[in-house]
Image: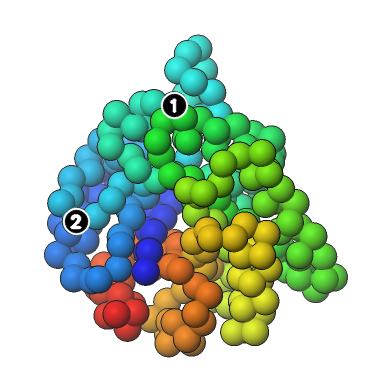
Amino acid sequence: MIVALNNKSNLDKNEFLDYLGKLNNIKTNSKLILCPTFINIANFNSLTISLGSQNVSSKNDGAYTGEVSAKDLNSYNVKYCIVGHSERREYQKESDEEIKEKINRLIENNIIPILCIGETKQERINNSYKEILKKELDILNDINNSNIIIAYEPIWSIGTGIIPTKEEIIEVFDFIKSIIPNCKVLYGGSANTNNIDMLKSINQIDGYLLGGLSLKPDDLQVFLDKLN
Ligand code: 13P
């Protein structure tokens, strides 16, 4: 199983170093990918955990104030990068076009993209969720997608404690895998120690993208023990 940890905009330098010490003691058979803040990427140090980023510039190096390029991330040994997270789509108004450019920069720099897709509550209710997911996946059409990870994160599940039913998850995962065969698909959105027993009974799930739980190493250990 792949378990990617999205710290989001949390943990200052000292908090991160304390947290990393605890994370490095975690025992698991799963592959852990830690995605800290950009600035904490420089403070990362682990023999067992892979390094990821939460974002990347859509441009190469150059006059783009405040941006961090894929080449720069690669030089810090970043192996994975989250792109298209719903929080960035909403707050930074990231478009599918921009997300596609980010994926291209990552592939050029040997970093594996973790592309987030997901529908809003309204899109789920009015039954347009498959259309939305298909549109978000369409950006991969002319990209060599053999080494891309997809993360299905229903927006209405993120940070709410509410997750889709087993049947809803199976339907979406089968749908994604019918469009992009052979790619790994993660589940994200309120995955925790209470619902992991149900989630792990779904064969289609190749791993998890964790937000809130990523910040609690003790609970994370319980979650990972249940996965093994
Ligand atoms: P939560 O696990 O806090 O719901 O966040 C999920 C997420 O957005 C991971 O990218």
Residue 144, position as x, y percentages in the image? 56, 41
Q: How is the image coloured?
A: rainbow
Taking the image as shown, residue 132 lies to the left or right of residue 126, namely left
The residue type indicated by label 1 comes to Ser
For the C terminus, the quadrant is: bottom left
Residue 209: mark in rendering: none
The residue type indicated by label 2 comes to Thr
Q: Is residue 132 above or below residue 9?
A: below
Quarter assignment of residue 71: top left
Q: Residue at x 43, y 44 (%)?
A: 112
Q: Residue at x 62, y 78 (%)?
A: 170
Residue 222, position as x, y percentages in the image? 28, 79
What is the crowding at mark 1: few (fewer than 14 residues within 10 Å), some, or many (at least 20)? many
Q: Which residue is mark 1?
A: 69
Whether residue 205 is visible to the viewer of this picture, yes or no, is yes
Q: Earlier in the sequence, mark 1 or mark 2?
A: 2
Residue 99, position as x, y percentages in the image? 61, 39
Q: Which residue is mark 2?
A: 48
Q: Residue at x 37, y 64 (%)?
A: 3
Q: CA distance from mark 1 to mark 2?
A: 25 Å
What is the crowding at mark 2: few (fewer than 14 residues within 10 Å), some, or many (at least 20)? some
Disc 1 vs disc 2: Cβ atoms closer than 8 Å?
Answer: no
Q: Is residue 141 above or below residue 109?
A: below
Residue 139, position as x, y percentages in the image? 68, 43
